[in-house]
Amino acid sequence: MTLGPYASFIVTSYVSVATVVVALIVWVIVDYRRQKARLRGLEAAGAIRRSGRSTAEVQ
C-alpha cells in the first residue's frame, strides 16, 4: 500500500489523533479514580447523597 507524496502528513495525523485519544482515555480514568476517592472521603466525613435516599427518608 502506497500513500503517495502525502505519506508523512497522513502518518503524522494518525499518530497525533491516536495520541490525543489515548491522552483523553487516561485523563478520564484518572479523573474517575479521583472523583471516587473524593466521594469516599465525603462519605467517611458523614456527607450523604440525596440521590441515595428514598422519598420516605427525605420527609
Image (cartoon, rainbow, N blue to C red):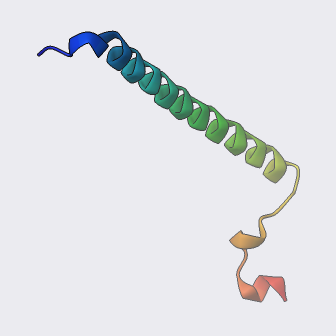
Front residue of 40/20: it is 20
Q: Quadrant of residue 53?
A: bottom right
Q: Quadrant of the C terminus?
A: bottom right
Whole-percent x and y of residue 22? 48, 27
Whether residue 10 is situated above or below residue 38 in the rendered picture: above
Name which residue lies at 88% across and 49% down: 45
14 sits left or right of 58 in the view: left
Name which residue lies at 77% across and 65% down: 49
Q: Quadrant of residue 1?
A: top left
56 sits left or right of 7 in the view: right
Whether residue 52 is situated above or below residue 32 in the rendered picture: below
47 sits left or right of 25 in the view: right
Q: Quadrant of residue 46?
A: bottom right
Whole-percent x and y of residue 12? 40, 15
23 sits left or right of 52 in the view: left
Whole-percent x and y of residue 7? 28, 13
Whether residue 22 is situated above or below residue 3 in the rendered picture: below
Name which residue lies at 59% across and 38% down: 28
Farthest residue, direction front:
5
Name which residue lies at 77% across and 43% down: 38
Front residue of 28/55: it is 28
